[in-house]
Amino acid sequence: MAFVTRFAPSPTGPLHLGHAYSALLAHDMARARGGQFLLRIEDIDQARSKPDWERQLIDDLTWLGVYWDAEPMRQSDRMGAYSQALDTLWDRGLIYPCTCTRSDIAAAMSAPQEGADLPSGPDGLIYPGTCRGRLSYERTFPEAHPRPQNETLRLNMALAVGPSNAFAHRIDTPNGGWNSYAGYMETGISPAGKTGRVEFTPEDMTKGVGDIVVARRDMGTSYHLSVVIDDAAQGVTHVVRGADLSQATKIHVLLQRLLGLPTPVYHHHRLIRDDQGKRLAKRDDARALSKYRAEGATPADIRRMVGL
């Protein structure tokens, strides 16, 4: 079986030690198994993505000794693939337009219980369903009504995890019935902190995740949608990424099932943190690779800094 990993940075700022660790780990895993390592530029956020940052990250990765086995994939070149997937979900009646802002959602959720902590999941605040009933006639006959363009679109989670969609597993028993769960293999750190099979139920998705955004206004897609489509297109068999994304994996497995895409093995690794224990962010320029390079650090020094 082929072993294919990838590194998928966004060109919205400098690469830091956390990026170096993730790229080196995925690269080393692929080389150790005689597999392939691929690069993907996640630049769907055109307002924040800059060519200079892309050139810098490619220069930093080359300096680290990370090399990829095919031309980098660029998400801004793949809007047609995302649009096609959205059309599929629309035609099946699984997505709907939403005009709510984040403040609208927070207000709707806090109104009956002011001062209480608002429920959140891997996609942020769990959407209260304000717009779920919009365009009810169009949703009854979606094939006769084209998908709205340049609008935020959400997945109707209750429908998506129903027995006729992502969680359809017939039990072969005299009485029949549905085996309603989904899962994936984790070789790193799961949401529960363990390695092995991770399973989740429709209730986990409706109550713990809610109606996720699959396309953002002025963007044409979302991280969750584009990442599963691109992993499948690149033939990625093992997704290597930080443990901060482990909670989002059930969203990605769900979308893979809905779109008929393969589910890779996932390896969520530890996060590189600063001296105060806070995970690194792109605004943390003090940990930028370019700064260490300017100070005379070598790729071997970076490996030691991140524990490799």
Image (spheres, grey):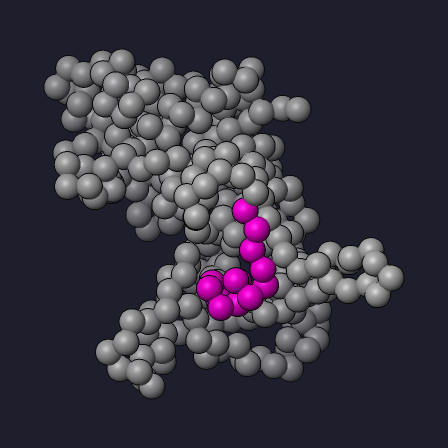
In x, y percent, where is residue 4?
55, 27
Please state which of residues 81 and 224 is positioned toward the viewer in this rendering: 224
Residue 102: name its quadrant. Answer: bottom left
Residue 188: name its quadrant. Answer: top left
Residue 58: name its quadrant. Answer: top left
Left or right: 142 in relation to 196: right
Is 115 a magenta residue?
A: no
In x, y percent, where is residue 245?
41, 46
Left or right: 14 in relation to 39: left
Identify whether 307 is placed above or below 112.
above
Residue at the far bottom in the pictured view: 112
Instruction: Give the magenta range.
Output: 198-211
In x, y percent, where is residue 117?
29, 71
Please state which of residues 78 and 3 is positioned toward the viewer in this rendering: 3
Q: Can residue 135 be seen in this view?
A: yes
Left or right: 160 in relation to 32: right
In which quadrant of the rendered image does the N terminus lie?
Answer: top right
Identify whether 274 is placed above or below 133.
above
What residue appears at the point 82 percent right and 55 percent down from the top-left corner?
A: 172
Is 200 a magenta residue?
A: yes
In which quadrant of the rendered image does the C terminus lie?
Answer: top left
